[in-house]
Amino acid sequence: MAKQVRTVYGNALFEAARDAGRLTSVREEAETILEAFRLEPDFLRILCHPEILPEEKEGMLNAVFGENADPLILAIMEALLDKKHGGEIPKVLHTFVGLALEEEKIGVAEVTSAVELSDADKDRVRTRLLDTTAYETMRVSFAVDPSLIGGMIIKLKDKVVDSSLKTKLGHMKNSLLTGA
């Protein structure tokens, strides 16, 4: 049920923002709201509290986001609260942001390496990702995990490229143990 809620509402927000010609601005605002929820998780808990009346919740949304919020985002959040799906707001916004980024041809990748990459190496990874995908721009987050020993793991959407030495050694170990 929760996945259906995030899909239905996320798609509805995407189509409304695209049809209104405000996809980028609504996406940017959704990202800002997601960051606000991340920094202040108690606010979402308050919005979802069953003893707080729907009109009070709507008042809180308007007080916090008010005139600055795009009416499309406010309407989706209010609809979710009215239907008692307030806890799904971040997931709906994440779904919407993912759809908007795809439409805008912006890729999002996570790169984990065994050691900190230099700026030049980061640029090479970013360029290689752009060269091998249909994206026009790429958001790449870089992390370090020394347990990888060497190499890196790249996650892009539902694809994972694991060239870490840790994984290669694990495969070698399994081959040796199974005699393959």
Image (cartoon, rainbow, N blue to C red):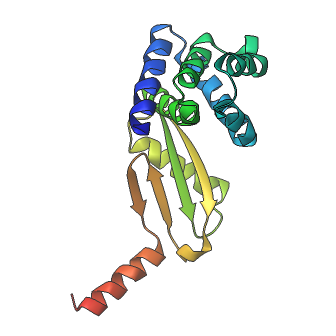
Looking at the image, which residue is at 53% across and 30% down? 85
Q: Residue at x 57, y 14 (%)?
A: 75
Q: Quadrant of the C terminus?
A: bottom left
Where does the image place residue 88, in percent across and percent down from the top left? 53, 34
Farthest-out residue, right:
63
Q: Is residue 82 above or below residue 6?
A: above
Q: Is residue 169 above or below residue 85?
A: below
The single residue placed furthest to the top in the displayed view is 20
Find residue 35 and report its horizontal and vertical position in percent: 69, 36
Q: Is residue 133 left or right of residue 13?
A: left
Q: Quadrant of residue 146?
A: bottom right
Residue 95 drawn above or below residue 167: above
Of 149 and 96, which appears nearest the observer? 96
Please tell me which residue is depicted at 66% across the width and 53% down the height of the picture: 119
Q: Position of residue 52 (x, y in %)?
A: 70, 27
- Quadrant assignment, res 114: bottom right
**Camera-side residue of 2 and 158:** 2
* Image location (x, y in percent) of residue 99: 44, 29
| Image quarter hosting the N terminus | top left
Relative height, residue 143 to residue 115 (above, below)? above
User: Which residue in the rendered view is the most extreme toward the left?
Assistant: 180
Q: How many marks?
A: 0
* Residue 12 sits in quarter: top left
